[in-house]
Amino acid sequence: MLNPDSVGRTFEGAESVTVSQSEIDAFCAVLSVDNTTVAPPTFSIRITLEQSQEILSNPEIGLDWSRVVHGDQRFEIKRPIVAGDTFKCFSAIESYKVTAGNEIVTVRSDLHSAGQLVVSTWSTLVVRT
Amino acid sequence: MIEVGTILEEKTFYVDRVMLKAYADASGDQNPIHQNEEYALSVGLPNVIAHGMLTMALVGKFVTDWAGGSAAVKEFSGRFVKPVIVPVDQKVDLTVSGVVSEVDGEQIKIELSASSAGVTVLGMSKAVVVK
């Protein structure tokens, strides 16, 4: 079970992540997107998935990623991601409830580059019990 | 002229295991339910399923093709209602449709829907674009 004390607190990723052009190219290639000068709108998941998993696997939070199903997803994009962006990820559990024995967790992750917010993402995760 | 009720021409994408592997590598999501049939069956799934975020990425492509590029999208959301089931050696459809629901100056809101094999897979999906 998730530690209720962790709800509402924001946790910062330990490392910065720099986006390369080859990562954007690979993501575009899957989707047959020809113009690779900026990343497609959902590209940020490449960074936030790993970062938020690392951040929220912290034992003091107690989120069990092995039983997580992705319920829904939202992005707010201040500007498109480009190669060379170096991001710090900040993740928070915005809401938490237990219904029908499942835990429903909303994780917000913000990506900041050079001190500016670039993308905010919200993932609703259902932890099957 | 774009106005409330303007329909985005429906488009069908095709998803296969090769695409799932490529998306796993491009996104970093190597969860075996998207690649390994034996594993998927062992956790109670009917077969290998596509990443929900791949479905969303393809719906995003539908939107950015219409809006004139990846930079156009300001907001994008969706709910993973049902999985896209991807049997071996098959190309399954992902059929995407959209309609303009709001126009506010430069900002256009689009209501989106995606289905596979006739079943809605992405619901409650919206995008806000600047075209």
Image: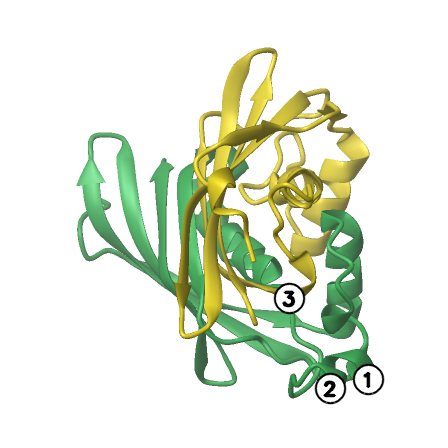
Chain colours: A yellow, B green
Mark 1 in CB contact with mark 2 (< 8 angstroms): yes
Q: Which residue is mark 3?
A: A67
How far across and down, in percent of the image, does residue A1 sit? 56, 58
Q: Residue furthest top?
A: A114
Which amino acid type is shown beneath numbered disc 1? Glu
- Side (left or right) of A99 relative to A121: left
- What separation in Å lies between label 1 and label 2 (alpha carbons)? 5 Å
Q: Is residue B109 above or below residue A110?
A: below
Q: Residue at x 74, y 65 (%)?
A: B19
Judged left or right of residue A107, residue A60 is right
Q: Mark 1 and mark 3 in contact (Cβ < 8 Å)?
A: no
Q: Is residue A81 above or below residue B103?
A: above
Is residue A122 visible in the rendered structure shown here? no
**Which residue is at the front of the view, A97 or A44?**
A97
Estimate the spatial distance between the alpha carbons at disc 2 and disc 3, rounded to whole Å. 15 Å
Q: Is disc 2 in the same subunit as disc 3? A: no
Q: Amino acid at mark 2?
A: Leu
Q: Amino acid at mark 3?
A: Arg
Pointer 3 local density, CA inside 10 Å: few below 14, some 14–19, many at least 20: few
Q: CA distance from mark 3 to mark 1?
A: 18 Å
Q: Chain of mark 2?
A: B
Helix or strand or loop: what does disc 1 sit on?
helix
Q: Secondary structure at mark 3?
A: helix
Residue denoted by label 2: B41
Check if mark 1 and mark 2 are on a common chain. Answer: yes
> Regarding mark 2 in the picture, which secondary structure is present there?
helix
Q: Nearer the viewer, residue A53 or A28?
A: A53
Residue designated by label 1: B38
